[in-house]
Image (cartoon, coloured by chain):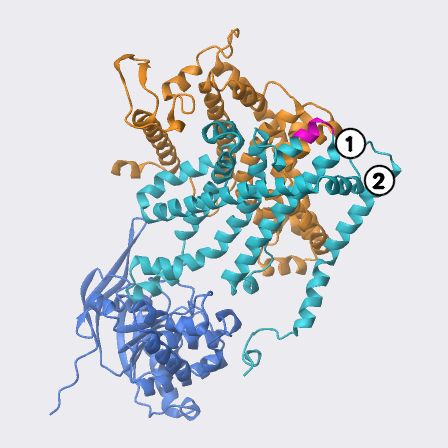
Amino acid sequence: MNPRALGEGMTATSSRRRTRGRIAYYLPAIAVFLGGLALWELAVRIFSIERFLLPAPSAIAGAFADNAEELLNAGLTTLVEAAGGFAIGLIAGLVVAFLTARFAFARGALMPFAIAANAIPIVAFAPIANSWFGIISPLSKMMIVALLVFFPVMINVVRVLTSAEPAALELMRSYASSDWTVVRKVRIPAALPYFFTALKVSATLSLIGAIVGEYFGGASEALGRIIVENAAFLRFSTAWAAIIIAAALGIAFYLIIVALERLVMPWHASVRGREV
Amino acid sequence: MHRAPDPIVRMESVEKRFNAGGATTAALSDIDLRIRPGEFVSLIGPSGCGKSTLLRIIADLIEPTAGKVEVNGKAAARARHDRDYGMVFQAPVLFDWRTIEANVELPLEVMGVARGERRRRRDEMLALVELSEFGAYYPWQLSGGMQQRAAIARALAFEPKLLLMDEPFGALDEMTRERMNDELLRIWERTGTTIVFVTHSIPEAVFLSSRVVVMTPRPGRITSLIEVDLPRPRNEATRESEGYFELVTAVREALRTAHGGTIPEAAPLVSDEPAGIG
Amino acid sequence: MIRLNRLPGVLRAVAAFVAILILIGIAWEAAKWLAGDPLRHTPWGVVDPPHIPPFVIKQFNDTNLPHVWDVIGAFFQPATRNSQFSLGAVLIDAAVFTGRNALVGFGIGALFGLLLAVVFVRSRLLERALVPYVIASQTVPIIALAPMLVLWVGTGWTSVALVSAYLTFFPVTIAGIRGLTSPDPRALELMRSYAARWSTVLWKVRFPAALPYLFTAAKISATASVVGAIVGEEPTGIRGGLGRAILEFNTQYTTGPQKLWATVMVAAALGIVFFAAVRLTEMIVLRDRAASGEP
């Protein structure tokens, strides 16, 4: 039986129509990308912009080809730092969030502190982290990233675990459920959408945190150091190539989270409206 | 001589006062009510008369300020822990992240029922409310009426002796509401559950119930109990019978006279009272 | 402890914050007591015989984790060996310097972010075309673009403010889009029935609805603008700000770690001040609306 006959229901479009619809949706963005690239190349040639001011896309592609192996290895190093720090910050943030949500007195004291601590420029800790965990070791960069990820995760998870729909809570009370059952069956599933939003923001921050950490010192085969060193020698094409890899990694990380979100919450993607 | 069965709900001298910002409101006062097993009782009255509060006191979601409440021969709190009743609210309160099937299974999961048994009861309930084909759908894919049917299936999933319903059809349009009334009666006759039904609608109260409890506000009191002796099963013909119109008039009069001769405030089609008050 | 419940929310938050700072200080010294360097001197006298901690953890030694009293003491000592100013005075000057740049950056970034949001709400086509790049822009480490920014714009506080603005605009844009599209469709229908112009609807309906969202984003942006201002100082070679101070004291770390720690604390305080300022503004502007429940 078709639910549409009885009330609002799913639209039953064919999968081919849906793919075409999706391409049409992304068309303007793709057009801007290609157009922007072409404009950039043209502008550099026509106005003879100096290499050190703004290299042409072709020059950057050339620099990438010349240093491909070095750049990709550096990309891997930076990615490992970002992913490692992300994992540490995520786990720590979740653990502390659950403990904080559980004990109301801790919540009143810790939340204002966590929110204020989130306002601390992480960049100030980079030199200290390098000293603590070794300037060459990737662990120092991971700890910087972990700190960057910890606070948003913790703050958002606490906020969301402690705000459940009153009607749903009343329903669970009528079943005489234990507190832990309510957490498992109501609070956590309801919290998932906001949790993933926090994760998406943290994913992009991880890459940046790793690179900022590298700026203050580290092994040379890392994206941050490549950018610093090449920029210092005015080899901007190579620096840009590294920057683009960094950006691409950040976007890839973000998209992985999006894919994970679709996997874990198949119900949500369809219900959401315009969501970033 | 045969003894009348023990009442499934017994309320004696129940009172409820709320403190809101220093001022005390008497939501309920001097409530005496006995509901027999298998009855279909409606609570009707204008906004603020305490009918939802009364329902929640039976459900042990609110504690009375004074008086005694017994459900199924036990204290209300004990009855809640023993899961003697199921509840249906005006909003379906289905979880977006669960399919209809999973939603209906929810209370069984909480009560630790084994998976095989859960599936069996869930399928039985979905068949009862005629939603069997929609088990794998998500709540947002179904219409309002279908969502309420799912909520009813969920409330009956663990076969409680008592079903408490707080204006469950208030958010539906008139045609759907009448259809849901028919469905509810069919389910009631099949399961033999006692139903306590809160509503704003006089026609609905008369059509469904064996007894109508009329309440008035400020403070919330029961002013009359009207027996509805229309024959069962009730259907379209019932809605057009003379007996039906007489009873509707009787209930309306009861509401009016209880209000000291004035017509109580027009009942809104959709209740927007906060839970627990009025 | 129970008495604390009677204090108003803000006071309670501040008290909780101070309490946790004190707890951290105690935990800090406790960690050094258990696993740091041997303790010989304290401001209150010599420890004789010196206390030898039972464990050794490298991160808790005097270089990596200077004593709390050393860090606090550093504020009152000369900033550098020949300086006539105390570290505290120098750092406060630096904080004001950086804070000014951050404020300008915040202003530019917030304005630009809002403008972008309005453009995207007005034209869905532009939104679909450009939003992916707006998001992608935040994956580019601005710290890498900063040297090139200096070449384009020149050294000086402009480039620092631009770096700061770069980190500020994004949360404002995203929150702006969400907020400007949040009004009840029925309210918008009402305005259409008055044949109101798009700009009127924007000003009278969309913008007030967007304010709560914008303030939430502003709290994130406030922090980001300070980070941007600090980060932007290094590539632009600007002197007199906290970024420069961090870099300088970093090179002196092995001989005087407490100066770097003192700088970190001042940077933290600056970030918190910005955040608090936004929160205060929010409480004033949105005082009639439902509270957000946050400190």
Label 2: few (<14), some (14–19) or many (≥20) C-alpha neighbours in 10 Å: few
Residue A232 colored magenta?
yes
Which element is circle 2 on? helix
Residue C205's x, y, as percent? Answer: 61, 51
Residue type indicated by callout 2: Ala
> Relative to residue C137, is residue A192 drawn left or right?
left
Q: Colour of chain A?
A: cyan
The residue tagged 2 is: A43
Question: Residue at the location (17% across, 84% down)?
Answer: B5
Q: Are marks 2 and 1 on the same chain?
A: yes
Segment colored magenta: A229-234
Residue B242's x, y, as percent? Answer: 39, 92
Residue A243, placed above or below residue C232:
below
> Relative to residue B4, is residue B24 drawn left or right?
right
Label 1: few (<14), some (14–19) or many (≥20) C-alpha neighbours in 10 Å: some
Q: Colour of chain C?
A: orange
Residue C183, placed above or below residue C71:
below
N-terminal label among 2 and 1: 2
Residue type indicated by callout 1: Leu
Question: Residue at the location (38% across, 80% down)?
Answer: B125
Q: Quadrant of the N terminus of chain A?
A: bottom right
Residue placed furthest toward the left: B1
Counting the numbered discs, the total is 2
Residue C228's x, y, as percent? Answer: 60, 32
Q: Which mark is residue A53?
A: 1
Residue B68's x, y, as percent? Answer: 17, 67
For the question of whether residue A126 can be seen, the reply is yes
Which element is circle 1 on? loop
Most frequent secondary structure within the magenta stretch: helix
Q: Which mark is residue B115?
A: none
Q: Which chain is blue?
A: B
